[in-house]
Image: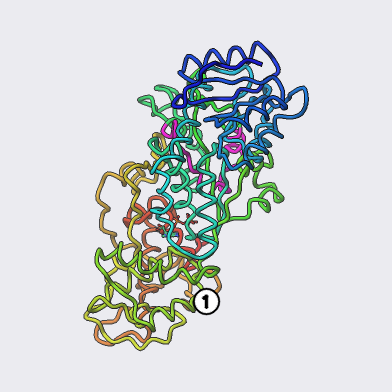
Amino acid sequence: MQQIKNPSASVPRILVVDDEAHIRELLEITLIRMGMDVDSAENLTIARQYFAQNNYALVLTDMRLPDGLGLELVEEVAKSNKNTPIAVITAFGSTDNAVIALKAGAFDYVSKPVALDQLRKLVNSALQVSHIKSSANHTVTNASRLLGQSQAMQDLRSQIGRLARSMAPVSICGESGSGKELAAREIHAQSARANKPFVAVNCGAIPEALMEAEFFGYRKGAFTGANEERDGFFQAANGGTLMLDEVADLPLAMQVKLLRAIQERAVRKIGATAEETADVRIISATHQNLEECVANKRFRQDLYYRLNVIELKLPSLRERLDDVALLSEGILQRLSGKAVTLSPDALNALLHYDFPGNVRELENILERALAFANDGIVELADLALKQAKSTLTPAGSFASVDMLLDVAEKNTADSVSVAPTPATAPTPATAPTPTQAATQAPAPLPEVPPIAVKEVPGQNTQTPVAASIPPGGFKHFDDELPKSLPAYLEQVEREIILRALQKTRYNKTQAAELLGVSFRQLRYQIQKLKIYEAE
Ligand SMILES: Nc1ncnc2c1ncn2[C@@H]1O[C@H](COP(=O)(O)OP(=O)(O)OP(=O)(O)O)[C@@H](O)[C@H]1O
């Protein structure tokens, strides 16, 4: 056992635990060169003594020790009140051990033979975690955008605080609109990676043929149309967090490649001969049941095991209706920029609504209601809830089409959202590529001849309806008023969405661009209106 003399209180101190003297020595030299103080232990017993007597910025332990497993130390350190990050050194190719250690509370891992640049990155992340913990920055939890004071939200926020201190992959599940992406952004914002990119990728929105290029990038000339070298999502997220949204939508072939990239922490651009390291933290999300997808052989078990190291479950809004008042206040404030309140009747109606679309639906309801609200008060009738028996008083004019569509998501300034930007996408002649659509103002929707004439069942039916428009379009009211405003507005919304879908040959990404809404919002409206592609 070797102890560095005269450790200064201001110098970060690291405990290295390994039974092989030459590895201890290598780690010690590297860490001392990085300006750290180092204590080293050759077995669990000595490591425990050191840990009990000192405060460490990081504990780095081998998995196999003469008197036990490094995993025991991981559990003890994770459970202690000291909040010390602990990382493990795993044998080459033993990624299962890494997953087990991460599940037990390890902050990160390095594989043998230890690559020194990876070790340096790990140490720097651990130091930032310790710094965030002890500095005023930690109050970021209080400024969380995830609103809600219910027990479920308080638990969620403290779970997020713990997860932010780890590199472990997190799998977020929850109903559509319940806040999965927001939770992922929070984990990133509170982590040591906060000043690096957060890249959110909608796996369901990328054409299969382009997946590899989008994820891993390509070299110039790698294929026809590859006119210049391009980074993929992994490179764009380097040092930060990569969110794989709707991960269940990944095709099986891509799942294999993704698994490899995550395990090796390295990717190879299409056309490149060498791999490059990819230092990304993976957060995945889905509204589907991934276990069921595994059982149905739609999702690889090994990838599931790799992504699902820690599971974060988002409660639905109807499970935490006591948050509705606070959420509404925050949303109204954000949307209108001034104090707008809900009348007691309106609040009461919301408290009895079941929100199948969760917080996103609450946002939509309130955004629509704001357009009708007078004198800074949202009344029950303004909400136009389906269950609410509203007697709507005419409020000037009917909602414009723009109002019916949700506002585009606003990315936070410190984050990057990467939309698929295919280089060689076989795109329909009339539809713009996503790249074009992102840079051009959406063109006005031209008249589209009606297709696949089918009768559209009633708007409130539970049966999905095929994507078809009645001949001549839907009935529009000139003089007479519609019998039900919500049903009428849904009808107009359906018509607009169907026209955009038909124009883009059912490419939802392009349809969303055309309508100036995000893919997620369009998908939500399609689900809500139960539109599906005509066979
Ligand atoms: N707790 C919350 N506090 C404030 N806003 C929230 C909360 N949860 C969700 N939201 C808002 O609701 C909207 C939907 O959230 P988000 O996109 O994170 O949901 P999601 O579960 O990822 O949806 P999907 O499954 O459709 O991808 C966003 O505008 C988000 O800001």
**Residue sitting farthest toward the right:** 67
Residue 331 is situated, as x and y percent measured from the top left of the image, at: 35, 64
Q: In this figure, which residue is indicated by the disc labeled 1? A: 461
Image quadrant holding the N terminus, namely: top right
Question: In x, y percent, where is residue 481?
Answer: 30, 86
Q: Is residue 16 left or right of residue 516?
A: right
Residue appearing at x 27%, y 44% in the figure: 439
Residue 456 vertical placement versus 299 (above, below): below
Q: Is residue 276 visible?
A: no
Residue 42 % position (x, y): 69, 19
Q: Quadrant location of residue 512? A: bottom left
Residue range corresponding to the magenta coloring? 236-259
Q: Amino acid at mark 1?
A: Thr
Q: Foreground: 235 or 178?
A: 178
Left or right: 349 with respect to 398? Answer: right
Residue shown at 38%/66% (left/top)? 363
Comparing 183 with 301, the one in front is 183
- Residue 167 on image: x %, y %: 54, 36
Query: Eyeballing the image, is 382 above or below 116?
Result: below
Ligand 1 rendered quadrant: bottom left
Q: Is 242 covered by the magenta stretch?
A: yes
Q: Secondary structure at mark 1?
A: loop
Mark 1, other Cα within 10 Å: few <14 / some 14–19 / many ≥20: few
Check the image and tell me how it is coloured: rainbow
The answer to whether any part of residue 168 appears in the image is yes
Magenta stretch: includes residue 103: no
